Image (cartoon, helix red, strand yellow):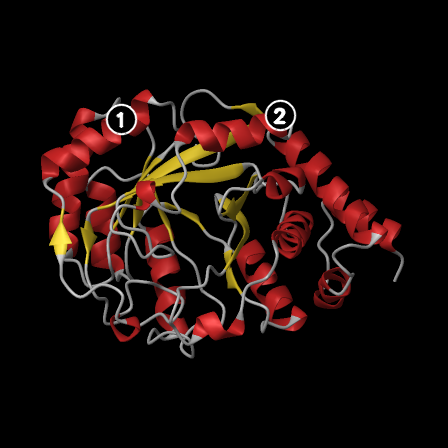
Amino acid sequence: MHLNNLITKALNDVRLTDDEIVYLLSLPPTSSENYQVLAASRALSARLCANRAEVHGQFALNLAPCPKNCMFCSFAAKNGIFKGSSQISPDDAVQTALAFERNGVNAIYLMATASFDLAEFCEYGKEVRRRLHPETILIANVGDQQESGARLLKDAGFNGVYHALRLREGTDSDIAPDARLRSIRAFKEAGLVVGTCVEPVGPEHSNQELAELILFTAAHQPAFSGAARRISIPGTTLAERGMISELRMAQIVAITRLAVPHTVIGNCTHEPCGIGALAGANLFWAESGANPRDVLEKTEEGRGHTVAHCSAIFNEADWQLLEGPSAFFS
């Protein structure tokens, strides 16, 4: 395969094949060829969003051991990181959302563990929606739902959801892959815009696995795709497998951008980093409260980034920041 031909193909919005994506993923991360891929992704990503990156804010409504047992998550009951359960008050949720709004985020995400009662989650959403500006984008990050649950989220005032089919779903989690697929279909049928990602990437995941998931995200016309590496939770089984480097993550972010249709203008990475922004990521998250990659109850005291920090990283990579509601969910 000829690299320049593949880049030209992607820049012209012609779909890359499975074999072509695997070839790009097999390039050594420190090679000059991979740097060409990063540069092409950065140029394409900037063109599609007029060089305006976005910072979204996410906070958790609750913290509890989760029975879905995603091995990469600090909430997993089997990981034993968090023993008790707690949740914030509706007023605390409103105040956190308003703080994110004042700080200029382009969308606000409410997150809860998979076992959190959906009706209660929607009551939080309604109260937050009532207090935000009407144009502020509100996103749900919840467990799998059927059609009725998806409609409840829509009726509560949510504009969209974050939902992903994770790598080795059903093996590294107690969630059936079909449940994730059904949920994505239900969300879209209810009129919710879905954002997704290739995650959580570890060193054990093959290029073929990554290529298949990149193509999966591309096929669903999401608000955004992208890639995120797995963050090791100390003392867990998956921590023994290690982590990929930020450079390898940036490579996957770039290839995802090249492989996804140009109608998808968002390209995320997590956690926020300069090399991700250089590689074409135009979406970062600021976080507060519980975080599935952190062992602290308040991630703002640990791994979580502030809106200002995310914005500063983008500025250092010569991105401008979008002002106002997210263009990805419009």
Q: Mark 2 against mark 1, which lies toward the viewer?
A: 1
Q: For the C terminus, which image quadrant?
A: top left
Residue 138 appears left or right of 122: right
Residue 165 picture location, percent across and down: 44, 64
Q: For the N terminus, which image quadrant?
A: bottom right
Tag shown at residue 330: none
At 52% from the left and 24% from the top, the residue drawn is: 321
Distance Cα–Cα, label 2 vs label 1: 27 Å
- Looking at the rendered structure, the kind of residue marked 2 is Ala
The extreme bottom residue here reads: 171
- In the image shown, does 154 or 82 lie closer to the viewer? 82
Residue 199 appears left or right of 250: left
**Crowding at label 2, few (<14), some or many (≥20) Cα neighbours within 10 Å?**
few
**Crowding at label 1, few (<14), some or many (≥20) Cα neighbours within 10 Å?**
few
Residue 32 appears left or right of 70: right
In the figure, residue 49 lies in which quadrant? top right
In the figure, residue 50 lies in which quadrant? top right
- In the image shown, does 292 or 164 lie closer to the viewer? 292
Q: Secondary structure at mark 2?
A: loop
At 61% from the left and 66% from the top, the residue drawn is: 210
At 26% from the left and 53% from the top, the residue drawn is: 150
At 38% from the left and 65% from the top, the residue drawn is: 180
Q: Which residue is mark 2?
A: 50
Q: Is residue 42 above or below residue 15?
A: above
Residue 170 picture location, percent across and down: 40, 77
User: Nearer the N terminus, badge 2 or badge 1?
Assistant: 2
Q: Which residue is mark 1?
A: 99
Q: Is residue 236 visible?
A: yes
Residue 111 picture location, percent across and down: 27, 49
